[in-house]
Amino acid sequence: MKNYISIILIGIIIMGLTFSSCDPNGPDPSETVIEVTSDITSPTTWTADKVYVINKVDFYIENVLTIEAGTVVKFPQSYQFVTLSGSGKILAQGTSEKPIIFTSYFDDSHGGDSNGDGGVTIPAAGDWGNIDMNGTHGSEFYYCKFLYGGFGTELSTLRLSAGSMSTIDHCTFAYNRGGVSSHYYIGALDADGADSETTITNNTFYNNILPLSIKSEIDIDNSNIFSRDNNTTQYNGIFVSGNINKNTSWLEDEVAFVLTSSSTQIGIGKILTLGDNVVLKFVQDAELTILSGETSLINHEGQGVYFTSFKDDDYKGDTNGDGVVSSPNIADWTGIFLDEYSEKFVGYAEWENILYNDPNAVVK
């Protein structure tokens, strides 16, 4: 009799455990979704077992925020901008198997249906604003995905402003905005205001409006990718601005480098090295001045190297984003000027690989 009772009790326990571990609805969403309503003012870690929803207007990171591999961070439309300040730093070190996701609140494919509408809403470019490094140093983004950002006039999704220095490696930028505002070309990854020691390597850009803008002194190797499954970007290029006052190398040969300043200088004694098959395009009336002459532009006559108009789709595709609406013409841009510091030649370069510049620029 005692054995019979024991068997019944054991069965009841097993049934209880079975029902408790097989909840068809999974964990309580309130236990997995964290509403972030306060700034980061002390060292903080976000863990991969949670989805973090930034539910605060003008969210500031003023101390170190460590984000574990596999963590999902979402942004509702009403709570869009993240700004680092003071000793703020983001250490987001994902892996290829467990990337860190920064995405729209409406993105059910990452972190589930966080807004609980059963898929009624779908994510779109510009659903949230951006993460602004704001002059801070030392943030690291490895194996992160930045999706559906670029709200408002700032257009960028990850912004390195005010001399910020960060490492962005093996990250994906997709379905973001970026674009053109007045005469400024703003990338989904906007490093136009970054420190020249910023590292941008092994990243993938596709289905953005404009992928990448950089300060002209940032080295760019040939490791970044600007398409996936034939999906590229409307303004598919690397948009650079500012003068070059340190030795710099541009090696990317999948897309063109676009010089967006009306006048760009390579400083006295400084060198810009180009890889083979690198193309430089110039916006309307733009000019490159090399203060120490042609020896400061290494490999300027290298294999596949060209200097041409922003409208020239024959070299590295449709960089100005208008399909076949525009076509290049003589005098689209001014030329490459070799300044008086040159020992060989003073005036505008006449290399055979310079296309569509103004042939009369020397007499302007």
Image (tube, grey):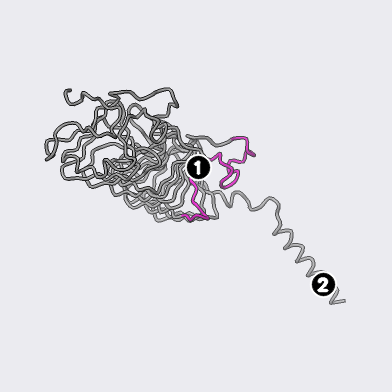
Q: Main secondary structure of the magenta part?
A: loop
The residue carrying pointer 1 sits among few (fewer than 14), some (14 to 19) or many (20 or more) residues within 10 Å by Cα, namely few
User: Against 152, is 194 above or below?
Assistant: below
**Residue 70 got which mark?**
none
Label 1: which residue?
Answer: 228
Q: Residue furthest bottom?
A: 2
**On the rendered image, what quadrant is the N terminus found in?**
bottom right
Task: Indicate the position of residue 325 as horizontal and vertical percent values.
Answer: 43, 22
- Determine if the magenta segment contains residue 110: yes
Q: Residue furthest right?
A: 1
Q: Is 220 displayed left or right of 70 in the figure?
A: left
Residue 296 figure quarter = top left
| Residue at (50, 48) in percent of width and height | 101
| Residue at (63, 51) in percent of width and height | 28
Magenta segment: 94-121
Q: Nearer the viewer, residue 103 or 28?
A: 103
| Residue at (78, 70) in percent of width and height | 10
Q: Nearer the viewer, residue 85 or 258?
A: 258
Query: Identity of the amino acid at label 1?
Result: Arg
- Of badges 2 and 1, the one in the foreground is 1
Task: Indicate the position of residue 40 as horizontal and vertical percent values.
Answer: 41, 50
- Determine if the magenta segment contains residue 111: yes
Label 2 or label 1, whichever comes before in sequence order: 2
Query: Identity of the amino acid at label 2?
Result: Ile
The residue carrying pointer 2 sits among few (fewer than 14), some (14 to 19) or many (20 or more) residues within 10 Å by Cα, namely few
Between the C-alphas of marks 2 and 1, the distance is 60 Å
Where disc 2 sits, the SS reads helix
Residue 298 figure quarter = top left
Q: Are marks 2 and 1 in contact (CB under 8 Å)?
A: no
Label 2: which residue?
Answer: 7
**On the rendered image, what quadrant is the C terminus found in?**
top left
